[in-house]
Image (tube, helix red, strand yellow):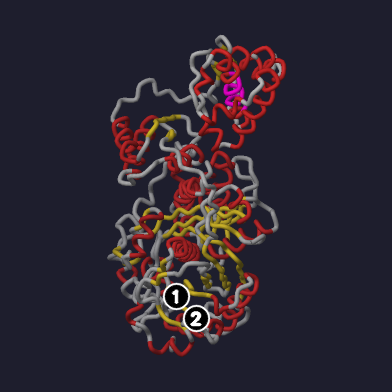
Amino acid sequence: MGDDIAVVGIDCLFPRAHGVDAYWELLLGSGDAIGEVPPDRWDPAAHPDVARGGFADGIDGFDHAFFAVPPREAAAMDPHQRLLLPSVWRAIEDSGTSPSALSGSDTGVFVGVMGGEWGRLTLSGQHRPTPQLGAGSSAGMIANRVSYHLDLHGPSLAVDTACSSSLVAVHLAVQALRTEECSTAVAAGVNLVLSPTLGLVYQQLGLAAPDGRCKPFAADADGIGRADGVGVVVLRRLRDALAEGSRVYAVIRGSAVNQDGRSNGVTAPSRWSQQKVLATAYQRAGVTPDRVRFVEAHGTGTVLGDAIECAALGAVHGVPRDEPCAIGSVKGNLGHTEGAAGIAGLIKTALALHHRVVPTSRHADRENPRLRLAERGLRLIKSPLRLPRGETVAGVSSFGMGGTNAHVVLASAPAPHRSGRVPSAAGVFTVTADSAEGLRRNLLAQAGAVAGRGRAVSALCWSSNRAKTGLPYRYATTARDAEELAGTLRRDAERPARDAVRPSAAPVVGFLFTGQGSTYPGMTAGLYRDLPAYRRHLDEADAALAPHTGRSLTELLLAGDERVTGARLAQPALFAVEYALSQTLTELGVRPAAVLGHSVGEYAAAVTAGALGLADAAALVA
């Protein structure tokens, strides 16, 4: 486990699948994302042979103000950069971390991207070059933009190995985590079909599918259909993720990258190199091929590519085994997302391990008999594959047109540690945004996301405070269940924003310590049980008071004893609680610029300010 890498955050944008939930629904429904080229890409009448493919909606949208990018610079930016930035932001939030919390950290960014259509379109003779276009069209800047805008100081690089680019980026991210070059890594792939050029190249090479569809391992497979795609995963060392209680989608056990070398053509695949990269990845993962339950194959749907890949898969996985190794390819749903193809397959596999079901591989019902799958110990996923309890091992392949191959070995996540805590009945749900209108939109979006959950919202509240926070316009509300929370969010979203002024600096915090009259039996007992920091500070105050009170105030509080409200014990108990609360908040980063106390609260305020030590204050209070 020491070298294992956890997938802790995911975000994606694929044709007809905006977001992780939509992507999973598309896969489960064996959906088809192929359609006509949008009119804002190119004139389909001018190139009718490449007029179909997988095209994502809204690739021209970008919230430049959110990322503090001037409008002129945003307009010159490659849309690969514009789409990747918000996707990385969402993936980091999905990992349970606020993007602002990574500012200044050694977080690395590794992005797979293929080609440079935006540069060809904007820096040709038709346009006058500008500094903004120069920076906006650089492939390397795709990764550097993310590091710059999120203030990430780890490795930052774009990877172009053609179709295997994003899986090679994952491999490099895994290596950087294992050598402790970074503590968190963002691995991504991004691909946008901006012109017909590469499709025409595929056509001349005899690789383009006339209907724009990839049909992996099918009898009617006839070539590649191009597609858009953005995929991001956030990776951490498994031991770190488990120590912090992070949700783990899947675990990366090992990976490998190699090259065909001088084979039977620079653009032709090599069975022997594919076999070798598979075997090396399994060896590094400490896994024998007979344990691999399913493989997300490269599966382009070309006659030559499918034949060579199945021969390589069979040579490695077709060892004596109880049941065949299942194979499939997401390209049957999306098309070939090229530079993002590897990350599309990796995300599909991580979600399959997380949900314990592998979706049907589209076009698998028309299996190509010439591939001799059964003879090779392989089978296509023709219906959803339910995964048994316990660890499941899977592989993901991605092969570049120039011969750079990658394979990643994943396993299902270990069972989460049960803390024994009883979830709180209520919580504080927070929403932040970069503008007043943005806050209103976020309230409506969150209302739709939480509606219908019908359960306690403590986990949602926890993640909202940990991950989706730090922007200047802020909202908070308490809630006991999802329906109540959704209703409150919708109601407040309709209220006009009054005095919505963007703060110019961090908020100034003051602590007010109340006096006698606020004590009650069992006060903060739940906090004492749930929060180690508070428990430590209350025990510290109790120990300081015990020589003077002759008893443990903590025991009385936990027991809900009525005597805690009596004159003799109310003031020491209140002081202990106020001291523990202020020390806990300070430890969590809420540091007061000023303190004020009323009555016995003055003692806790004096200790917080450093004017009195704990021992002296305890003696005076008692």
Is 590 rendered above or below residue 229?
A: above
Q: Write down the residue under mark 2.
A: 309
Identified by mark 2, the residue type is Glu
- Of residues 319 and 339, the one drawn nearer to the viewer in this rendering: 319
Q: Is residue 582 magenta?
A: yes
Q: What is the secondary structure assignment of the residue under circle 2?
A: helix
Q: Quadrant of the N terminus?
A: bottom right
> Does residue 531 appear left or right of residue 549 in this picture?
left
Q: Quadrant of the C terminus?
A: top right
Q: Write down the residue under mark 1.
A: 299
Q: Residue at x 46, y 37 (%)?
A: 66
- Per the picture, the main secondary structure of the magenta-coloured stretch is helix
Tell me which corner region of the image, top left, top right, bottom left or bottom right, holds residue 335.
Answer: bottom left
Q: Is residue 580 magenta?
A: yes
Which residues lie in the magenta part? 575-583
Identified by mark 1, the residue type is Gly
Is 3 rendered above or below residue 106?
A: below
Is disc 1 in contact with disc 2, using a CB cutoff of under 8 Å? yes
* Residue 381 rendering spot, x and y as whole percentages: 39, 76
Residue 99 — which label? none
Crowding at mark 2 (Cα within 10 Å: few <14, some 14-19, many 20+): many
- Of residues 143 and 272, the one drawn nearer to the viewer in this rendering: 272
Is 355 rendered above or below residue 11?
A: below
> Does residue 24 appear left or right of residue 2 in this picture?
left
The alpha-carbon separation of the residues under discs 1 and 2 comes to: 8 Å
